[in-house]
Image (cartoon, grey):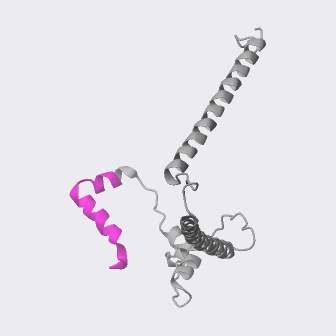
Amino acid sequence: MPEKAPEKSKISASRKLMLKSLMVAKAKEELEQEMVEKEEQKEKYLEEKAPPIHTSSMSLAELRTLCEELHAKIDVVDEERYDIEAKVLHNTREIKDLNIKVLDLRGKFKRPNLRRVRVSADAILRSLLGSKHKVSLDLRANLKSVKKEDTEKKTVEVSDWRKNVEAMSGMEGRKKMFDAAKGPNQ
């Protein structure tokens, strides 16, 4: 079975290069167009917000009042800028302090990967209830102990099974089995 060679693209290398250069040229044109549009928007905004001042027809007193108004506006803007910078500095300090607190809470060292640990039920209860409560879940201690002697005594003598079947048939046989199960403990 012959191995398949990797599929060649259907476009030649020179064609690819030409398409790539065309795409780059188109992107460059669009970028330049976008820059021009941004400049136009900026100029339009400045014309709306700050119309040009015609100082040629103003007297010296009018120019002085205009300058005083502009300086007052500049002072207000500077005060706002200063207040905003102060708030930003305060917030950055607070962010740094909170980051330091977070790192302190996480711990200074890299935490190791946790491994599974087998914990006994007693240890779990002690951790949940505290050391004051002494609860034992030692299930083996609560089990009844069975002595080997008792198991050996309970071996049934082998007899003819047909006699057993006849004796145990009917309701009387079931009553015998029930009474035998109660045993001599009563």
Report the residue at 45% width, 62% height from top.
Answer: 156
Query: Where is residue 160 shown, x and y percent of the image?
Result: 40, 52
The picture places residue 116, in percent across and down from the top left corner, at 66, 64
Which residue ends up furthest to the top in the rendered image?
1
**Where, quadrant-wise, is the C terminus in this rendering?**
bottom left
Q: Give the vertical position of 35 relative to 82 (above or below).
A: above
Q: Nearer the viewer, residue 83 or 176?
A: 83
- Does 117 sit left or right of 169 as displayed? right
Residue 94: name its quadrant.
bottom right
Residue plotted at (58% across, 54% down): 56
Q: Main secondary structure of the magenta part?
A: helix
Q: Nearer the viewer, residue 89 or 143?
A: 89
Can residue 5 be seen in this snapshot?
no
Q: Residue shown at 57%/70% (left/top)?
A: 68
Q: Foreground: 52 or 104?
A: 52
Highlighted range, magenta = 164-186
Residue 19 in the image, given as x and y percentages of width and height: 70, 17
The vertical placement of 131 against 162, above or below, is below
Q: Residue furthest bottom?
A: 132
Q: Quadrant of residue 60?
A: bottom right
Q: x%, y% of residue 177?
A: 31, 63
Residue 101 highlighted magenta (yes or no): no
